[in-house]
Structures are given as C-alpha cells and as structure tokens.
Amino acid sequence: MRHGGKILIDELAAQGVERVFLVPGESFLAALDALYEFAAIRTILCRHECGATMMAEATGKLTGRPGIAFVTRGPGAANAVGGVYVAREDATPMILFIGLPPTAMEGRAPFQEIDIEQLYAGIAKWVDVIRDPRSIPDIVARAFHTALSGRPGPVVIGLPEDVLSASADVEAGKPVGAPVVRPSEKEMAEIAAMIARARRPLVIVGGGGWTQSAQRDVEAFATKFDIAVATAFRCQDYVDNRHPCYVGHASFIPDAKLAAGIRAADLVIAAGAELGDVTTGGYTHIGHPDQTIILAHPSPKDAPSVCRAALTVSATAEGFAAALTALDAPALRPWGPYRLSLRHGYEASLAPITMPGDVKLEEVARLMSEILPDNAVITNGAGNFMTFLHRYFVYKGFPSQVGPASGYMGYALPAAIAAKLAAPERSVVAFAGDGCFQMTGQEIATAIQHEVALVLVIANNGMHGTIRMHQERRYPGRVSGTTLVNPDFAALAKSYGAYAETITKTADFEPAFRRALAADRLTLLDLKIDPEAITPVRTLSSFRAATLE
C-alpha cells in the first residue's frame, strides 16, 4: 500500500522525470514528502508560479518530454496560467499539477477553491481532477500521452489533498513514448510530383515536436534537392544557419529579400510550421492564388493557419523529415538561382547596420554568436531587443534557441534556468529586455539557490521599447505609459549573491561576456542601450519623423 503522493511520484519517475518545478502548498504536502524520499527526482523551488510553469515549458521544448510543475490551489493556479499559455502557443509538452482542497469540500467554497477545469479549458489540451488514488497511474499515463501526441501541448491535473494522503494498492504504470507518424507513400509521391513542377519551391520548418534527427534529415533533403529552407518565427535553430540552403528567419522585421522571396515562392512546404501572422508577414507573404501550399503537421485540424493547403499531410516533424530524405531529386532543378539569391540575401543581412548608442546591440549579438560554442543555448523573452538576435545571431543546431512564440515577457530567465538544469555541460545565456526581465526577475534567487551558473544579458533602454515604437508611429511625441524607472540591475543581482557588471561601452562587452561564461554562478550583464536603437534597421526618431511628415 502506498499513499497517493507516493504513487504519483513513482509514476513520474517511471516516465523518466528528473526534476519538478514548484511553488509549495499545503494541498500537496504528501507529494512533497514523497519527493523528499525519492532522490532520483530533483525538486526545484521557484519564487513564483509563472516562473515555475515557464521552467517546465522550457524543459519540454529542450527535451521533447513533458516538463512538470506543481502549484497550489487558488492564487497558485491563477499565477501558473502564463507558462501553460506559452506551452499551448508553442506546442510544447508539459504537465501542471495543482493541489486542491479535499474532495469532501468541493463546491462548498473552501479556502482558495478554484474551478481549474473552467480556468484552463481554453488553454490546456486536457484538464482533469484525480478523485481516487487508484486512478493515478492511468491518469498520469494519459496526461503524458495527451501532452505528447498530435500537436503537443499542456495538460493540467488537479490533486485533491485527501486523494494524495489516502492509500491504495495499485500496479505501476508503463512509460509513454512520443509517437512518430510518417506520411503515406502516396502522399510523398504527390509531394515529389509537386516539387518537380515547381519553379521556386520553399520549405518552411517550425512547430512543435522538432528533433535533432529531423534537423539532419531536412538538411540532407535540402542538400539533395538544392532547395531553399527558411525557419518559422522563433524556430531559427531548426536548421544550421550555416547550411547553404538556409535562407533566413520568417519573423518580425524580416530581411526584405527573404520577405520578397517568400511571396515569390510558387510552392511552400510547411514542415510542421504553423503559418501564423508573424511567419507570413500578417498573412501577406503566403496564401496568394499563384502559390501552392503543402502542410505537414501532426494534427492538421489543430494547426493555427488560415492559409488554404493544396495538400495536407498528417505527420510528426520527425516522421515527415525522414520521409523527405527518401525522395529522389528530379534531374532538372530550375530553382537553383532562386535558392542562391535568397542565400546571398541572408548572408548580406548578417553585416551589422550601425545604430546609435555607446553599446551597440548589433555588435553584442554578433560577438555572442562568434564566442559561444555551437551547442550553447540562448533563451529570450519578448520585445524589440530580440530582433537584434534574430538578425545577427547564427544558430548552429537544435536545440539552441528557446523563446516564446507567444511573445510572453519574462520568459528568458526561467527558461535559462531550466536549460542549464537540463544540460549543465552547455553554456546558457538568457537575453532579456529591462521590462521583460522585471516580470520574473525574482527567479535569480532560484538560480542562486540551486547553483545554476548561467549568463543573464539585459538590454536596458529604460522603456517598454516595442510599445514605444508603435506609440511614436501612431501618436508621435505623445509618450505615455512606456517609460521605466529601473533599479540598478547589477546591484540587485549582487544582493541575491550573483556576479554582475554594468556595460556602458561596446568594447567592454566581450571581456565581460567571457568572464561571465567562466563564472561558477549566475552572472548578470546590464547593457545600457540608447533608446534610439529600437530595431536593427531603424531608429526610434525615424518612426516619429515618418508619422509627422
């Protein structure tokens, strides 16, 4: 006989879970007690539930297995929504466990009661409450299967306090694997025929469920066919950017030549990529009448795309990429000049455009790309500062870019903690804006407590830069609600026990960055950025001037 908390932790261990991220609550003390006894699963104590779920989500991105978070009822469940939303938008497998009041109190307005099924119904793939300890193995197995199958995503499971403390005699569950679904031979024959008829074919890779083998297979296919490959929004690491067939990142502020090239493509193969508004340039680059679209997706009905596909294929990224390698390239490939032109455009875009200020983000991004080892992990939050990395950082392979396609601020630091815990041998850098960092900055304490040595780079321009850019474009000179009064970030980090430096000149960044990479604890680098350097290609005042003209 085992109590429910012990059964639950045993089931997580059987699924290969190595760590859980949590903010403690009395409603799952039995699970905490079981974690104390089960040394194989590490407990990571976080400072806020949003940080905990972001760490779990990032774990899912990096490992392909669901990241696990525990939070308590009421306020904990409400605070945890952020990371679950990121997982939904990014198609990331994760499981959130929420401690609940005893079942006898359900519906009687006990302290901190919240209906998690209503709260998460529109966000999670599946929400359930365990009301019998004997059902724990089955529900945990279903949770893993649901998180991993089809379009991956988050699952939320409620844990009533009395269920975790009650005892039951149940058999252990079996590990649940991620399915690999391949397209049919007929579908691949049709794809081969469509490629042979094309003049300007383009592959766009993205979406959930990507793997290193998918990267290798897509690169091999691209080489054999001499076909252009672009990456969807914040999926830059899906293909080695040094590969001669890689042509760029379909993102905010894309290179003009890439945007024109996407519009000019007569065949677009979306390999897992979900053709949303960012990747498609607000639905203007893809979907016109002269363009044929092939959508390969693990769950096409769940793919958030408004572009009509001529052929829809149900396949996981790994299965579809493997099937592509089996195709024979046509003898005539008239698209070579198209691919080469786009590649030259991408290479030209890597030359930094000098922007105002004593610390130049274009040089910072270039230096980071040159200094970091090929297997380094870069995490990021959301904001205009990220467009400098999008443009100037050369990603060498998967997984190395961990960012929220949802544009959720505060993601960089929690994701970097998860990345370093998952791969302690790899260099990990969190790249955040000053407003972005302050959403979850207290998680520095988590990194210090658990001895997580990462580098946190803050692009500090004293404002919510993206909103200020739009503000100047629409209401020039009328600044309201976007100026930030920031703390001394270096002093704040040092108060937690971290190492920190303030960077006021570009020349100081490289030696400071090398010191940070060699440090044995979290290191914060506060970069003083000129507010004028709002994008890699335009200044803030240019937006204002264009509106006033």
Image: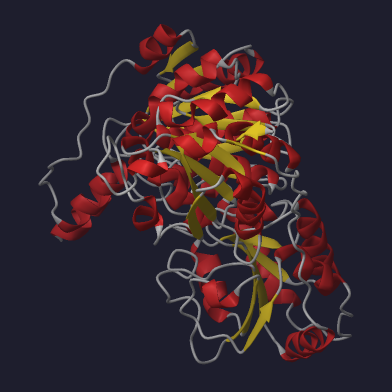
> Measured from the top left, where is residue 212 in percent x and y?
77, 51
Number of marks in picture? 0
Q: Which quadrant of the figure contains the N terminus?
A: top right
User: From the viewer's perspective, is residue 169 above or below residue 492?
Assistant: below
User: From the viewer's perspective, is residue 255 above or below residue 61?
Assistant: below
Q: Which quadrant of the figure contains the C terminus?
A: bottom left
> Measured from the top left, where is residue 489 in percent x and y?
36, 18
User: From the viewer's perspective, is residue 156 above or below residue 501?
Assistant: below
Q: Residue at x 40, y 29 (%)?
A: 48
Q: How is the image coloured?
A: secondary structure
- Which sits in the foreground, 123 or 430? 123
- Which sits in the foreground, 237 or 88? 88
Give the left or right position of residue 304, taking residue 33 as reference.
left
Q: Residue at x 27, y 45 (%)?
A: 540
| Residue 430 seen in this snapshot | no
Q: Quadrant of residue 26?
A: top left
Q: Residue at x 52, y 21 (%)?
A: 509
> Measured from the top left, where is residue 361 in percent x and y?
46, 35
User: From the viewer's perspective, is residue 535 above or below residue 275?
Assistant: above
Q: Quadrant of residue 419?
A: top right
| Residue 547 seen in this snapshot | yes
- Which sits in the foreground, 200 or 11? 11
> Measured from the top left, where is residue 228 in percent x and y?
70, 69
